[in-house]
Every structure is written in C-alpha cells, then in structure tokens.
Image: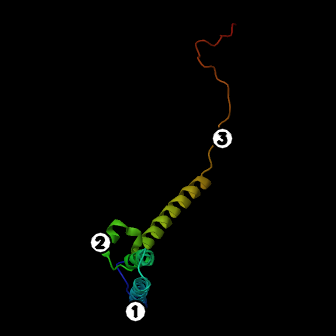
C-alpha cells in the first residue's frame, strides 16, 4: 500500500494533518503563556520547561506517525502506516502456513508401530537343536 488511494482516505489523511497543526498551534500558545507567567512571577526555577519538553515529545511522535518526518520512519518503521499492513499480511501468511501444516498432520495420522521382540544380534541368539 503506497498511500491513500480513495478520496475518503485522502480526506482522512488531510484531516489528521489539520488536527496536528491545530495541536501545534495550541502547544505554542500554551508554551508561550507558561513562559510569560514564569517571567512575570519573578523567574526562579524554569518550570515551563517540563510542559514544553513533555508536550513537545508527544508532538514529535505524533508528527512522525503522520509521516511529516520520513527520515525518522526509516529508522523507526513502526511509525509508518504501511508497517501495520505488512505485519498483518505477515501474520496471516504464517497463520495460513500453520493451518496447512496442522491440516496435513490431521489428514495423515502417524502409523502405529507394533512392538516385536527381535534379538539384538542374530549370531548371538541361541540355536535350536534338532
């Protein structure tokens, strides 16, 4: 699956990107407000950094999952939309192979061997005298 192929999939992808950009805008406003409040209140420990870093890490993962940083997807392929489809296909192939192996084992039951005592060495077996 190279990318969206139907109009519905394209609209969904564009809507996801729009929501991401809204999220980034809110992040910037909240970060600015937190730094402003910190500066007005006299400074001290830079507590807004925890908001900026925590939320920023979440936004970075969100951006990667949307494919906005394709270079990252080369190193972390599970962020790409195609990865999930590949994993499902791989699991289904393995499942089909497993079912085929089970089916062939069920159709061909193993033959039971009858226990017979045979001498280990024919030469050492005692001969019957006439």
Mark carried by residue 7: 1
Which residue bears the numbered disc 3? Answer: 112
Which residue bears the numbered disc 2? Answer: 71
Nearer to us of marks 1 and 3 is 1
Q: Nearer the viewer, residue 36 or 80?
A: 36
- Cα distance in 3D space between marks 1 and 3: 61 Å
Q: Is residue 78 shown to the viewer in this render?
A: yes
Against 125, residue 53 (above or below) is: below
Farthest residue, direction left:
71
Could you tell which of marks 2 and 3 lies nearer the N-terminus? 2
Q: Where is residue 57 in the image (x, y as percent from the top left)?
A: 41, 74
Could you tell which of marks 1 and 2 lies nearer the N-terminus? 1
Position of the N terminus, as image quadrant, is: bottom left
Label 1: element kind: helix
Q: Position of residue 63 (x, y in %)?
A: 38, 79
Characterize the local packing of mark 1: few (<14), some (14-19) or many (20 or more) Cα atoms within 10 angstroms.
few
Q: Nearer the viewer, residue 74 or 7?
A: 74
Nearer to us of marks 1 and 2 is 2
The answer to which quarter of the image holds residue 107 is: bottom right
Q: Which of 55 and 9 is in front in this view?
A: 55
Q: Residue at x 40, y 72 (%)?
A: 79
User: Position of 75 compared to 12: left or right?
Assistant: left
């Amino acid at each position: 699956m190279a990318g969206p192929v139907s109009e519905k999939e394209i609209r969904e992808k564009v809507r996801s990107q729009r929501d991401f950009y809204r999220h980034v805008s809110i992040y910037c406003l909240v970060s600015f407000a937190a730094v402003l409040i910190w500066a007005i209140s006299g400074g001290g420990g830079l507590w807004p950094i925890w908001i900026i870093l925590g939320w920023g890490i979440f936004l970075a993962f969100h951006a990667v999952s949307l494919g906005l940083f394709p270079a990252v997807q080369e190193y972390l392929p599970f962020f790409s939309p195609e990865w999930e489809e590949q994993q499902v296909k791989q699991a289904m192939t393995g499942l089909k192979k497993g079912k085929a192996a089970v089916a062939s084992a069920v159709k061909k039951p193993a033959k039971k061997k009858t226990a017979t005592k045979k001498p280990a060495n024919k030469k050492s077996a005692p001969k019957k005298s006439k």
